[in-house]
Amino acid sequence: GNQNHSFLQGWTQKMTAAKKTAAPKTEATEAGLNADLTKGAREYVARTAASVKERNDSAYEGVTKLNSGIEKTMTRFVGGYVGLMGEMAKAAHEDVTKALTTVEKMASAKSFTEAAQAQVDFYRDYATTNYDRAQTVVAAGRDMVNEGVET
């Protein structure tokens, strides 16, 4: 039993000595490993943040371009609409002016034939003018659509 005891005691002493000499290396290795992990984690976070920033910048540029395109299209549309409304107001004014002029001609006519001719002239001119206006409106609408498609 004594021999066994001394063997165990010697073995225990060797292991304790090994632990004491190995302990500083293990702690140093763990510290290095922790430093590597920390450095790796920092690099990963930095790369991820840079990637997210690039995506954010890209998304912002895309939205800005889309917004700019919508703004240009709406500006053209509103401008075209305002122009069309102005043309309609002008056309209504011209129509009323021509109608009143026709009424004056008919009232001052010396004969039924002269009055009838004034009315016929009014309707012929009115039809021609409105046909021309309709063509102008269609052309303006086509131009607005084409400009919108090009944007």
Image: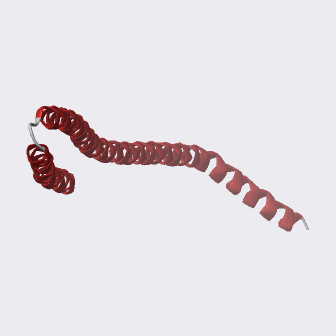
In the foreground, 39 or 102: 102
In the foreground, 9 or 124: 124
In the foreground, 16 or 107: 107
Residue 7 quadrant = bottom right
x then y, percent, for residue 97: 17, 32
User: In the image, what residue occupies the spot 50% across and 48% down?
Assistant: 37
Q: Quadrant of the N terminus?
A: bottom right
In the foreground, 97 or 24: 97
User: In the image, what residue occupies the spot 10% across and 44% down?
Assistant: 118
Residue 60 quadrant = top left
x then y, percent, for residue 58: 31, 47
x then y, percent, for residue 102: 15, 37
x then y, percent, for residue 67: 31, 42
User: In the image, what residue occupies the spot 17% across and 53% down?
Assistant: 134
Picture mark count = 0
Q: Residue furthest front?
A: 111
Indicate how the structure is coloured in the image. Answer: secondary structure
Q: Residue furthest right?
A: 1
